[in-house]
Amino acid sequence: MRRLMVLGLVCTLSCALAACGDNGGDPVMADNRQEPETGATAAVSKLDEGLRNGVFEKAIRASGAACPSVTGSDRAEISPGVRGWKAQCDNGSAHLIQILSDGTAKVTSRTH
């Protein structure tokens, strides 16, 4: 049920971004091994930091991990050729998040 809520939020944000029009930017690519981001993955990468951190808070909580608030997020290579984000929570926990093109969030959590 929680994954559906995250999927719904990401889909809603994707639609909102589509209504804003294209800013002419190219998809973010770290190297030649990566394919252009599509779907929800591309939509999340285009969000401003505040909205993106809100999406990550919901994804982290939906995974069952505690995260009162995401205080920052940065692009990160989660595994070779797979880009995602590292999210830092105000309780000291850190999480790697991959948003799949269908809106599913894969969260890998650790504590200090």
Image (spheres, rainbow, N blue to C red):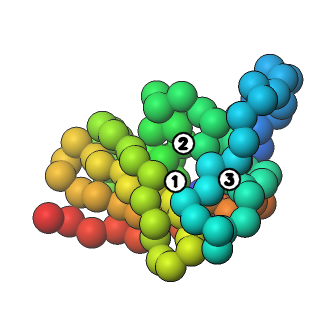
The residue under label 1 is 59
Residue density around tag 3, few if under 14, some if 14–19, many if 20 or more, within 10 Å: many
The answer to whether the residues at label 2 and label 1 have Cβ atoms under 8 Å apart is yes
| Mark 2 residue element | helix
What quarter of the picture does the C terminus occupy? bottom left
* Residue 8 seen from this side: no
- Front-most of residues 30 and 72: 30
- Residue at left offset 48%, top offset 47%: 56
Q: Say which amino acid is labelled 2.
A: Val
Tell whether 109 sits left or right of 28.
left
Q: Say which amino acid is labelled 3.
A: Thr
| Mark 1 residue element | helix
- Distance from disc 3 to disc 2, alpha carbons, whole Å, reads 12 Å
The residue under label 2 is 55
- Front-most of residues 105 and 41: 41
What quarter of the picture does the N terminus occupy? bottom right
| Name of the residue lying farthest toward the bottom | 80
- Distance from disc 3 to disc 1, alpha carbons, whole Å, reads 13 Å
**Closer mark to the observer between disc 3 and disc 2:** 3
